[in-house]
Amino acid sequence: MADTKTIGGFEFQRYEKETYNEDETIKRSIEFHQWIDKRRSVRDFSDRPIPKKVIEELICSASTAPSGAHKQPWTFAVVSNPELKKKIREAAEKEEHESYTKRMSEEWLDDLKPMQTDWNKPFLEIAPYLVIIFKKAYDLDEDGNKHTNYYVNESVGLAAGMFLTAIHNAGLVALTHTPSPMNFLSKLLERPDNERPFLLIPIGYPAEETYVPKLDRKCVDEVAVFYE
């Protein structure tokens, strides 16, 4: 059988994917859950360097995510320059201080107590890489014409999730940091008007002595409804 065929004037390629018997499928799903359940958000980073090649591959993995009409409406801005990381930290802490002291409700602050977080963000300078994921509200061609992107938030959210999974797979740790508002990132990184900051993710190895909150994740009965 042919490896490619033309449908509606467009070329399609044969989809090849290994499948498993029922027992193996169950086994693999359990093993993956046990592995991914060890992923945690970490705020204590080592400054141990990471090869640039690793970051490139993590981004390529994230970019395999599905997206509306395959527009891939994301940009991964990778920052390792110490001076720029310092500027990002200063700007982020300014916004975070405003949030913790003026913007957040008492309920919000109370919900954060088990995390023991505050407006100080030293990891933004310590982690060897900061990756800022920007969502593209629309695309621009070489002539400056706008082209629509579809399901942008959903698409970029999927890519971010796959990015975090790839980071965990590489033996690294990360944090989804969302200082609000994040417009300062667009200015500091001189991103075009069609891009909006979506997530700021420090990436690195965990510090030699790292602790994370002892928390329980919701069980399947609390997060799923089955209609059988």
Image (tube, rainbow, N blue to C red):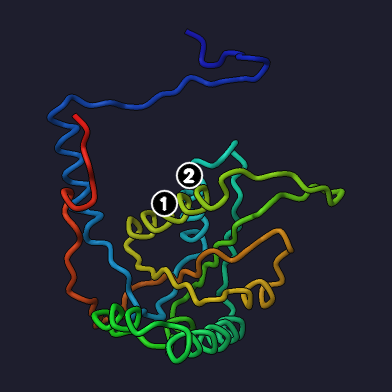
Q: Are marks 2 and 1 in contact (CB under 8 Å)?
A: yes
Q: Which residue is mark 1?
A: 162
State which quarter of the image contains the C terminus: top left
Q: Between marks 2 and 1, how big is the CA–CA gap?
A: 7 Å
Tell me what residue is drawn at x 17 percent, y 65 percent.
216
Q: Earlier in the sequence, mark 2 or mark 1?
A: 2
Secondary structure beneath dot 1 equals: helix
Three-letter code for the amino acid on which mark 1 is drawn: Met
In this picture, residue 52 sits left or right of residue 217: right
Q: Report the residue that reaches farthest toward the front.
A: 106
Mark 2 residue crowding within 10 angstroms, few (<14) / some (14–19) / many (20+)? some
Give how far across and how far down residue 152 sits, in percent: 57, 50
Give how far across and how far down residue 122 sits, in percent: 43, 87
Is 96 drawn above or below residue 139 in the view shown?
A: below
Q: Nearer the viewer, residue 11 or 196?
A: 196
Q: Which residue is mark 2?
A: 65
Tell me what residue is drawn at x 83 percent, y 48 percent.
145
Q: Report the residue that reaches farthest toward the top.
A: 1
In this picture, residue 219 sits left or right of residue 190: left
Tell me what residue is drawn at x 16 percent, y 26 percent.
22
